[in-house]
Each structure stands twice: as C-alpha cells, then as structure tokens.
Amino acid sequence: MTTPLIELKNIRKSYGGGDSPQVDVLRGIDLSIHAGEFVAIVGASGSGKSTLMNILGCLDRPTVGDYLFAGENVAHLDSDALAWLRREAFGFVFQGYHLIPSGSAQENVEMPAIYAGISAAERHARAKALLTRLGLADRTSNRPHQLSGGQQQRVSIARALMNGGHIILADEPTGALDSHSGAEVMVLLDELASQGHVVILITHDREVAAHANRIIEISDGLIISDSALSHTHVPVTANSDALQAVDLRQRLADGAEHNGAWKAELLDAVQAAWRVMWINRFRTALTLLGIIIGVASVVVMLAVGEGSKRQVMAQMAAFGSNIIYLSGFSPNPRTPPGIVTLNDVAALATLPQVKRIMPVNGTYAGVRFGNVDYMAYVGGNDTNFPDIFNWPVAEGSYFTEADERAGATVAVIGHRVREKLFKGQLDPIGQYILIENVPFQVIGVLAEKGSSSGMQDSDDRVAIPYTAASVRLFGTYNPEYVVIAAADARKVQEAEQAISQLMQKLHGGKRDFHLTNDAAMIQAEARTQNTLSLMLGSIAAISLLVGGIGVMNIMLMTVRERTREIGIRMATGARQRDILRQFLTEAVMLSVVGGLFGIALAMLVGGVLVLAEVAVQFSLVAVLGAFGCALVTGVVFGFMPARKAARLDPVKALTSE
Ligand code: ADP
Ligand code: MG
C-alpha cells in the first residue's frame, strides 16, 4: 500500500478542563484517507464532525494523537508551516460560505493566490477562469451580499480551487441552500472528485453523503462505521500531481521563492484597507478627523508661531539695534520713580560710547484738523530724531535746531496721522493742526515705517520740538524717557554699563532709572515667542495623540468586527505576519490619509490667516514632521490591534459572530 495522504492515529480533542467542565469532543479517531478518495463524514449534529474537519484542515490541533500528512507529523510544524499547508493542500468550503463581505467575487477568489505569491495577471486570469467554469462569469464584480446563497457557495468553491485545492474540505456545503442550489453544488463536488481532487464532505444528510464513494459515520466523537473497511475495494484514481504538489519537502524551497510576494501582499493590503475605509466612509471620516485636526493644528500653530516671531524681529530691526532707552524707575514701590533731567542728558552726551542722545517727552493727545479729531502719540524730541531712528521725512522737512531753541510750534506728522487728518487734501505742509488746542504748523511728514515697537503703530506719531512740547503741553523740561544711540552696535552692552555707572554717580548712587535696549527686547521677545510656539506645538501634539487613540479605537473595533474575515484569511493560508501586515497597513493608511488631509486643511487655514493679515510662516520641517508624527501614530496605535488580530485562533475566528 502507498502512504496515505492523511493518517489520523488516536486523535482526541477536549475542550474546557481546569475550572470549566471538560468536554471530550473527539475520543480516539483512527482514519486513513488516500489520494483520489471522495469521503463523506456523516453524523448527528454535535457529534464532532466540524471539530474533526478543523483538525484535518490544520486549522486546529488535536489534544492527543498524531496527524500524519503524507507521512509527516503535522505536530512538528509551526504556525507558518501550517498556514503554508492550508494554502497549498486544502480548500475549504463552509456551510456559511465565509466570503469576505467587503470584497467582490473576483477578489474573494483571488485571495488565497495572493498569500501564495502568484502574480497579479495570473491571479486575475485564474480567478476569472474558475468563476466562469462555475457559471459566475457575469458576477465577478458582485459583492457577496449581491449574490444568492448558491452563487456564494460557488464562489467559495472557486476560492477553494484557487491554489489547486488538492483536498477539498466541505463542511455542510449544502446545509444553507435550497434543494436546487444544493444539488448544483453536489454536482460540482462530484466533478471535482472525478478530476482527482480528494473531497472530504461533512454532512448530516445521508442523501448528500450518498454521492461519496466512502462513508464514515461518526457518533459522539467516535467512528462507528466506515464503508472502506466493509468493502475491501477502495477506488484509487490518484492524481499523482496532487500528491506531488503538496510534498512537504518542497516547503522550504517554496518558502524562499514566495518571499518576493510581499509586494503583491502589500498592494492587496492597501487595496483591502482602502475598500474597508471606503465602505465605512462615515466612520472613517470621523476617525480621520482626529488625525486631520492634529496634523493641521501642529502645522498651523508652528507656522503662526514662526510667523509672528519673524514679524516681531523684523519690526524691531527696523528701529536699529543700537538703541538704548533710559527712563526713571522706582527701586521700591513706596518711593516715587527717579527723574532723569536734561542735565543728566547733557552729561551722558559726553560719554564716548554714546553717539547720539535725545530726550523725549511724549503722550497720547488729541490732534485736530478742521473738524477731524484723532488720537496720536505726540512726542517732543530734538533734531536727532531722523538720525537716531533712521527715519527721514517723506514730504516737507524736519524742524531745525533754531526751531528747537525758539520753541517753535511746528509739527512733523507721521504717515498715518497724515492719512487720518488730511484724507482728501494733497498737501498738509503749511496747514495748522491743533494739538490739545495749541495750534502747530505742519512742516513735514515722516516716511512710512509700517511697523511697531510694542503695541502701537509707529506711524501714528507727531514729532514736535522738545522745547515747544515742554512749554506748551507738559509744563516740565524733564524728559519722559531718553533715547540713546550707542556708538558701536556691537557694544550696546558696554554702552549700557557706562551709562548706568554715570547715572548712578549723578543720582548719588541710587539706581532710580531703568535701561533697556532693542537687542535685549528682541531676545526677550524671541524667547517669549519660542515658549509660545512650544506651547502651541505641544497642544497640537496632544491633539495628534488623541487622533492616534482614535485610530487605535477604530482598529480594535475593526478587528472585532472582522474576526470572521481574519479566520477566513487564515483558513486560506494567511500567516500571522500577513494578518499583522494587513491591519497595520490599514492603520497606517488611516494616518496617511488623515495626514494628507491635515496638511491640506493647514494650508487652507493658513490661506485664510494670510487673508486676515496674520503673519504665518509655513516650514517644510513642520509639515514633514507633523506628517511623520501621524505616520508613527498609525504604526504605534495600530500595532496592538493588528497583533491582536494576528494572534487570533483560526477556528475561534472562523466561528465568531
Ligand atoms: P458537529 O459539527 O458534528 O455538529 P462540532 O464538531 O461542531 O459538531 O461540535 C461537537 C461538540 O463539541 C459540540 O457538543 C460542541 O458543543 C462542542 N464544542 C465545539 N467547539 C467547542 C469549544 N470551542 N468549546 C467547547 N465545546 C465545543
Ligand atoms: Mg458542524
């Protein structure tokens, strides 16, 4: 006798044990099946037929006993090798068809070939040919719910044949079908048996079993009769190809060859992922929202942070970086602030570190021309103004030292003040304006600065002679603050020190004054901006994290919902790592799509902000960083559900609801 294709020796299967009561489902099965046989296993419901079939199909392992496949003990195979065996040797046909609901008939039939690493073209052709052979040529793109039960069962038979299907394991294949469709399915199985496929048919229906040439009856987990034992004649029309194809010794060589299949598998995983996302698009969109908002907020927040930082820096630079401001200051809250006098100013002017020095006495005051009133910063300052602030006049001229000495009531107005007061009038020069009801003659208009050093617009300004301001507006000659241009822009710090020393000497050792400079302000501002950016960035990162948790949630749900699909994929030969890859791909796809939409949204929001004149500065690093974070989020949060899916037990997965 030749080696049997399948040999079971004293197979037992028990469930439970431990704290739950032990159920012995199979209680010692001895069975040999040879190539070319058409076997029916009959028995009452609950007798252990399906359990036996799962063991035969290497979906499940026996508790006790040996299973020899072509002479080799299956117990020695790891889960990958078992997956290989299922893929190469078996084709399953189930009572409930077990098609993947999201895939078309064609895709369902092709699935086993993907795991076998067969090229796309060959796969398409073969699936098409099988479907045509089974009378479904015009139903290839239908999804299972668009097919009748009989058609679905034919699709599942085509799937069983996709990789050869040398051994067809059919568990109650007609159980859910009407008699006509059932008869059709039986005709197909008869045909396959006559073509040399081993067909193992499980049924509780004796009429159906009669199609087989060997009938094994099982009851309560034991074989109670086997027609092969009573009739000595076993019809062996073995298809030698069938045996060769499943030669286990081929496995290693085969495994190496199939390593190139990862591309096809990845493509399939991406397609499957896309399908599932599309079918559940509302749910997908909601999940994506988390990632989209996360990515968009990271990008926008960083862009706004960077934009405002650059804007502030640019504005500060506009005033020159060698400027030092000196003002009175109260060293403790109970004493009045120190007063900087014009004598101090004169003394400081002699310092070699000081290039120019200018007292300023200013305030916000009402300015009026005709019947137009406007509030502007009115500063009394001397003729150093254009030079210190690098701020020339655009029209007319600046006031002179003679005006300064004489306390002339003349004014040089800022760009914005000109716009507000002289709307229709082309030439303000020579006109009289009222500053706090004192008439001043406009003699010049400052060039537009277009920036601010602090809160206010720098063009919102009127410059008048210091003397005139002191006499007419403030009633004091003491400056509000003093502007000093350091001789060397690189030695502002040193200049500050020299000024500080001299001031302390002049003020009897008291530090009742305060010095700041633009460089320090720029630095302080930059620090604040950086902190702000960091804060905004971390808020955004948190939202990305929340998005990631959303992905994990949806993936866990998906795995639960698609447990059956995972079982089907495993039955048709997917290895654990194929399942892992599939679900990881789905999670990453979610994140990639979310990331892309997020970037698009960020651009949109950025555009709106630009229109609203908010300074935004997009950086490629931020965009790539956010996208990368989304990707990593997908991998990290997708891994746990994917691994959970990959570790499912095939039988449990298949029988899940
Ligand atoms: P059949 O296919 O002949 O109707 P099954 O092989 O499906 O029978 O089941 C045989 C017996 O094993 C049944 O009594 C069933 O309750 C029990 N059984 C099957 N699977 C499990 C399981 N996972 N845990 C406990 N009992 C099980
Ligand atoms: Mg059953």
Image (cartoon, grey):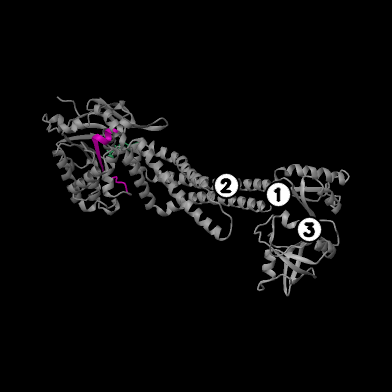
Asked if disc 1 is less than 8 Å from ligand 1, the answer is no
* Residue nearest the observer in this picture, 296 or 554: 296
Count neighbours of disc 2 (C-alpha within 10 A) and say few if under 14, some if 14 to 19, many if 20 or more: many
Q: In terms of secondary structure, where does tag 3 sit?
A: loop
Give the magenta part as a residue range.
84-101
Residue 518: image tag:
1
The kind of residue on which mark 3 rests is Asp
Count neighbours of disc 3 (C-alpha within 10 A) and say few if under 14, some if 14 to 19, many if 20 or more: many
Q: In terms of secondary structure, where does tag 1 sit?
A: helix
Q: Which residue is mark 3?
A: 382
- Please check the rendered image and state whether residue 345 is part of the magenta-colored stretch, yes or no: no
Count neighbours of disc 1 (C-alpha within 10 A) and say few if under 14, some if 14 to 19, many if 20 or more: many
Badge 1 or badge 2: first in the primary sequence: 1
Q: Is residue 231 left or right of residue 339?
A: left
Q: Where is residue 225 shown, x and y percent of the image?
A: 19, 32
The kind of residue on which mark 2 rests is Gly
Q: Which residue is mark 2?
A: 537
Q: In terms of secondary structure, where does tag 2 sit?
A: helix
> In front of the other: label 3 or label 2?
3
Count of number-bearing discs:
3
Distance (Cα) linking label 3 and label 2: 46 Å
* Residue nearest the observer in this picture, 344 or 625: 344
Distance (Cα) linking label 3 and label 1: 21 Å
Badge 3 or badge 1: first in the primary sequence: 3
